Image (cartoon, rainbow, N blue to C red):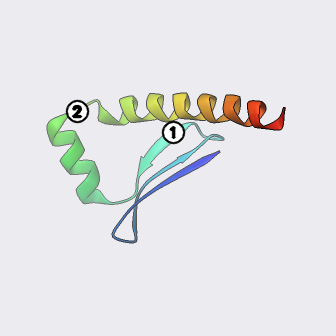
Amino acid sequence: YVIVQMVDEVQVEYYDSNTQRSIPKQDWVDQANRDTDPDYLERYTENRKGNQQVFKANMGILKQ
């Protein structure tokens, strides 16, 4: 499961279920988020893990 967040065709965030980490891909995005919420990366990572579980459950429903 992979999430790639894009802004104006530029990748700004990446999440991979293998590493289970949300990784900012642009320094300006990382800095802007840290300025408003120092713990944003941990919160984003947990949010992405939750999205992964919802997606997995929905795929199971679709297979039925």
Image position of 12 (left or right of 4): left
Sequence order check: which comes first, mark 1 or mark 2? 1
* Residue found farthest to the right: 64
Image coordinates for residue 62, horizontal then vertical, percent: 76, 37
- The amino acid type, in three-letter code, at marker 2 is Pro
Asked if the residue under mark 2 is in contact with the one under mark 1, i.e. CB atoms within 8 Å, the reply is no
Give x and y (percent) for residue 64. 84, 32
Specify the farthest residue to the bottom: 9
Along the line of sight, the residue nearer the viewer: 1 or 59: 59
Residue 5 falls left or right of residue 2? left
Disc 2 crowd rating (10 Å Cα; few below 14, some 14-19, many 20+) is: few
Number of residues whose C-alpha sits closer than 10 Å to that of mark 1, classed few (under 14), some (14–19) or many (20 or more): some
Q: In the image, what residue occupies the spot 63% across and 40% down?
A: 17
Res 64 label: none
Above or below 52: residue 5: below
Image check: 15 left or right of 39? right
Quadrant in which residue 44 is drawn: top left
Residue on which disc 1 sits: 21
x 60%, y 49%: residue: 2
- Secondary element under disc 1, as helix, strand or loop, is strand
Is residue 49 shown above or below 22?
Answer: above
For numbered disc 2, what is the local secondary structure? loop
Residue type for callout 1: Arg
Question: What distance separates the C-alpha of mark 1 from that of mark 2?
Answer: 16 Å
Residue 41 placed where, x, y %? 36, 36
Q: Read off the residue under disc 2.
A: 38
Please tell me which residue is depicted at 39% across the width and 58% down the height of the picture: 25
> Residue drawn 30% across and 34% down?
40
